[in-house]
């Protein structure tokens, strides 16, 4: 071996051990994140669709997806109009919302926000949130898809997968949802997945009184529609990390 070859071989082996060390550190950090914060380890899959905890990398991908547009600007599907503003403002709204809600995984408020991936491509968010989980076991679902992914059945599939996670995985007692009357896709998703209409309220949307439908699915209703939802999900739903999250949520406070 010449001197130059020897130097090159030594450099390459120290690079390999450095990259091994970085990988080990990353994997240790991830493992300890999940052990500290079990919600981060939850995954739900049905064939090629996956719900995954929103880490920083996914938050940035979701931010740029949202910045490309979520809905017709003439219509506002959300109570809080976070999709108004420049592309940069919308992208930052995604980041700050995700950062803020990550911590709400506990008895006072349970908020679960999942990035939705189809064939590995980030297409939107499916979430659920509610107060006093150990007592009420009730959450309201909410979701959005990048506009380029609307109307392909993804909204229905991701809701069916989340319902499975909430009822089967976390033992929810009821799940609710709201949709403005003029949001036909969102109303259709709630009805297709089996929620029942639970009244209509007038709420203020961007300064105007607007009818909003409220939907509800009890555990009894879930038992009736779970097989329909199994079909709507597009494949058997596989859950990871849910037992750990359930133990975390149901642990007595100390
Ligand atoms: C709501 C949303 C998540 C639904 O996802 P999606 O993938 O577009 O919906 P799907 O393709 O699964 O369609 C579900 C049903 O809605 C119907 N639908 C979809 N778009 C529609 C439209 N513009 N008008 C009427 N019906 C529509 C579909 O026909 C389908 O019913 P069908 O299968 O019986 O035909 C998505 O449209 C979205 O992100 N919209 C903007 C944000 C939003 O409204 N979020 C919800 C706030 S409450």
Image (cartoon, rainbow, N blue to C red):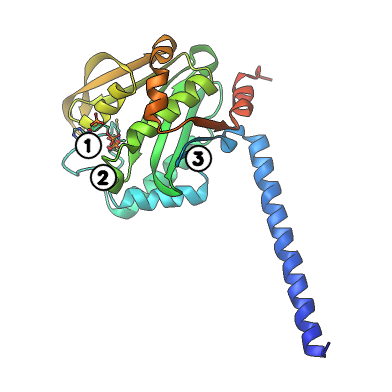
Residue at image location 26% in from the left, 40% down from the top: 151
Of discs 3 and 1, which sits in the foreground?
Answer: 3
Q: Which residue is mark 2?
A: 84
> Which corner quadrant of the image does residue 43 belong to?
top right
Determine the secondary structure under disc 3. strand
- Residue 8 lies, in percent from the top left, at 75, 82
Mark 2 touches mark 1? (CB < 8 Å):
yes
> What secondary structure is marked by label 1?
loop
Q: Is residue 92 left or right of residue 85?
A: right
Ligand 1 is within 8 Å of the C-beta of the residue at disc 1: no
Q: Is residue 240 above or below residue 140?
A: below
Q: Residues within 10 Å of mark 3 (few under 14, many from 20)?
A: many
Read off the residue under disc 3.
52
User: x, y percentage for residue 72?
Assistant: 20, 43
Q: Quadrant of the C terminus?
A: top right
Work out whether mark 3 precedes mark 1 in sequence or the reverse, and give the earlier one.
3
The x, y position of residue 175, in whole percent, is 40, 19
Q: What is the quadrant of residue 205 in the picture? A: top left
Q: Is residue 13 left or right of residue 99?
A: right
Q: Residues within 10 Å of mark 2 (few under 14, many from 20)?
A: some
Label 2 vs label 1: CA separation? 9 Å
Marked residue nearer the N-terminal end (2 or 1): 1
Residue 128 seen from this side: no
């Amino acid at each position: 071996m010449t001197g130059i070859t020897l130097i090159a071989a030594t450099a390459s082996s120290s690079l390999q051990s450095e990259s091994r060390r970085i990988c080990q550190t990353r994997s240790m950090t991830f493992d300890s994140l999940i052990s500290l914060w079990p919600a981060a380890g939850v995954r739900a899959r049905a064939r090629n669709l996956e719900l995954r905890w929103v880490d920083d990398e996914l938050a940035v991908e979701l931010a740029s997806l949202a910045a490309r547009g979520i809905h017709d600007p003439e219509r506002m599907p959300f109570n809080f109009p976070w999709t108004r503003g420049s592309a940069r403002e919308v992208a930052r709204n995604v980041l700050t919302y995700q950062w803020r809600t990550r911590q709400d995984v506990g008895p006072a408020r349970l908020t679960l926000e999942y990035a939705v991936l189809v064939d590995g491509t980030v297409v939107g968010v499916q979430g659920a949130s509610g107060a006093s989980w150990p007592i009420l076991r009730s959450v309201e679902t909410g979701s959005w898809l990048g506009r380029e992914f609307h109307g392909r059945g993804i909204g229905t599939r991701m809701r069916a997968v989340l319902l499975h996670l909430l009822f089967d995985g976390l033992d929810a007692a009821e799940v609710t949802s709201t949709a403005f009357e003029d949001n036909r896709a969102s109303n259709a998703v709630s009805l297709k997945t089996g929620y029942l209409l639970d009244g209509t309220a007038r709420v203020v949307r961007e300064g105007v009184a607007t009818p909003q439908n409220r939907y509800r699915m009890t555990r009894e209703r879930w038992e009736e529609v779970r097989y329909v939802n199994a079909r709507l999900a597009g494949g058997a739903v596989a859950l990871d990390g849910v037992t750990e999250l359930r133990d975390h949520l149901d642990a007595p406070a100390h």
